[in-house]
Each structure stands twice: as C-alpha cells, then as structure tokens.
Amino acid sequence: MSKTKKDIEELTAEELYALARKREKEEAEREEEKFAKKREELKAKRKELVAKHRRELAALDREILKLGGTVPRRGPGRARRVGGGPTISEQLCAIVATQPEMAISDIREKAEESGVETRNLSQTLAYLKRQGRLDSPRRGVYAAP
C-alpha cells in the first residue's frame, strides 16, 4: 500500500490529471451503460404496453362492429374533421375568403370565434398556400386566390 502511495506521490501533476480524466471517462461510460440498459428496459415495457393497448382496442372495435356500430378510422392522408363537418383547412379557407386580405392575427381571431382549432394555424396556412388554396401577397397576410 505504501508502494502505491509513494507511486502516486511521485506522479507529476500532468500524470495525475490524465489519470483523473481517465477515471472520470470510465465512470461516465459505466453511468451511460446503466442508463442505456434502463432505456432499453423502458422501451421494451412501452412496446408491450402499446401492443396490449392495440389488442384491447381491436377487441373493442370487433364488439362494436358485431353490434352494428361503426368504428372511426384515422389513417395517413385522412383529413381531420370537426364534428363530421368541413375540415379545418376548409374552414380556414372560408374564413380568409370573407375579406380581400387577412392578417394571421385576424384569421386566428375569426377561427377562435367560430370554434376552429388554431393550435397549428401558421403551419396550416403555409400548407394551404403550398396547395394553391390561399395566396400570400405579403408576409403574414393571406388572401383567397
């Protein structure tokens, strides 16, 4: 033991610093391995829960269909409708069409008044502009084509 202590005392500051960095790196790697293992366990648990949830939903859907009901399906490319009526995009186009030009703040205000979801308003307006369903004469201002 005294030999080890003597060896440590004979090390230069640079060597001690390098040893400390090495030790710190080893500790960080052990910690990361522990976290990686925990993440994998949690991911496996999540996967099991999702599979169980899907099986239960499928069983409920089969029961509903057996009793003559309909099951709502939402897949990629299906427009989200509010209460079975027009889509949010259609409602926003109708709002913009009420005036020659409208700023985003005005569109948001009118949409909220009519009960249209405004959570992703900017993205929806940009989408409608790309689709050619709206024009944008200036930044932040939209008009019906």
Image (spheres, rainbow, N blue to C red):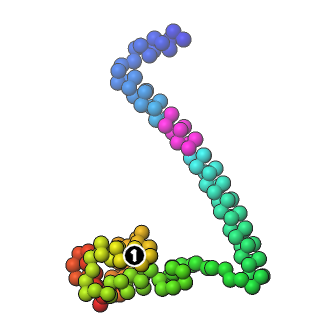
Residue 77 visible in the current orientation: no
Image spot of residue 7 (x, y percent)? 45, 15
Q: In terms of image quadrants, where is residue 10?
A: top left
* Displayed quadrant of residue 17: top left
Q: Which residue sits furthest front? A: 113
Identify whether 23 is placed above or below 83: above
How many marks are shown on the rendered structure?
1
In this image, 82 relative to 12: left or right? Answer: right
Element type at marker 1?
helix
Is the residue 31 above or below the residue 95 in the image?
A: above
Q: Decide if residue 17 is in sight here.
A: yes
* Residue appearing at x 71%, y 76% in the figure: 61
Residue receiving disc 1? 113
Q: Quadrant of the C terminus?
A: bottom left
> Pointer 1: residues within 10 angstroms few (<14), some, or many (20+)?
few
Q: Which residues are magenta?
A: 27-35
The quarter in which the N terminus is drawn is: top right
Residue 28 lies in magenta, yes or no? Answer: yes
> At which x and y percent is residue 43?
61, 55
Front in this rendered view, residue 3 or 108: 108
Residue found at x 54% / y 37%: 30
Tag 1: residue type? Answer: Glu
